[in-house]
Image (tube, rainbow, N blue to C red):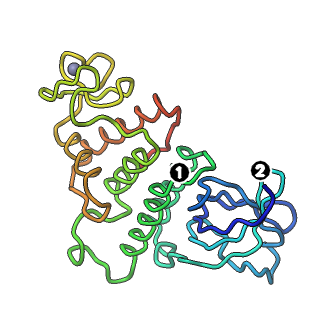
Amino acid sequence: MAGTVKTEAVVLRSIRFGEADRILHLYTQQRGRVNAIAKGSRKPRSRFGGRLEPFFRLDLLLYEGRGDLLTVTGASTVSGYRDLRASGPAITAAARACDAVLRLLDSAEANRAAYNLLCRYLELLDRDSRPGSGEGEGAAGPHAASHAAGLAFRLKLALAAGFVPELASCARCGEAEGITAFSGAAGGVVCAACEGGGFPLSVAAHEFMVAALGRSLAELPAADEPALRQVERAIGDVLGYHAHVQLRAAA
Ligand SMILES: [Zn+2]
């Protein structure tokens, strides 16, 4: 297996290690989740510069030896998302997105849908944080750092990871009419007859989930906060029950 891997990657987490090194938790285009060590990267004149920080999208050369930890031998920036980095809400949203990827996508195999989704979300956060990108101009819809956008990202990530909730008909009996609740155990929306164990789901929350999965992140539907809280609970229940993953609060 020893050899060099060339891949794009997003830095999910960057941890100081030893005297001058870093351990990077990466989501890569070619290999999914991998960890790598960047030796000497905290020295003042490191050839890696400041680009081994969270949210950087990089072109990497990784040396793969015998262990699980790869070694970074080359890194160039694809996108540093400079405007994202200047906005507190965008940094928080990006950190939550990276944390969700860490928790939900732990396997070292490529998942292009998940990789592209993460890059797209970081791009939107960057765009919406750009000076002059005020509300009311350009694309409509909630700011990428909003609760709604964060939840749409989670839904799409759940889809990419294979844990998307059933939304078209009752997850227990298949009835399409009379959906009243959501059941994490059942894996989706449920009808009044099958409601046991679930929680009441509003029409607005149900519609938001359907629309968010059907549209791009930049074309999000609007939803009020009570509906979004139900959506967050629904995603959390499905992932907790079926993926055995607990995500942090989305807002
Ligand atoms: Zn039912």
Q: CA distance from mark 2 to mark 1?
A: 19 Å
What x and y, as percent, mark residue 117?
A: 43, 59
Ligand 1 occupies quarter: top left
Marked residue nearer the N-terminal end (2 or 1):
2
Q: Residue at x 37, y 28 (%)?
A: 184
Which residue in the protein does label 2 denote? Answer: 68
Which residue in the protein does label 1 denote? Answer: 101
- Residue 27: numbered disc: none
Is 13 placed above or below 6 here? above
What x and y, as percent, mark residue 59?
A: 62, 73
Q: Residue at x 38, y 50 (%)?
A: 156
**Most extreme residue toward the left, as rendered?**
177
Q: Are marks 2 and 1 in contact (CB under 8 Å)?
A: no
Q: In this view of the protein, which residue sits in the foreground, 101 or 236?
A: 101
Crowding near the residue tagged with mark 2, few <14, some 14–19, many ≥20 C-alpha atoms within 10 Å: few
Q: Inspect the image, locate mark 2, and give the three-letter code of the amino acid beneath it.
A: Asp
Is label 1's Cβ within 8 Å of ligand 1?
no
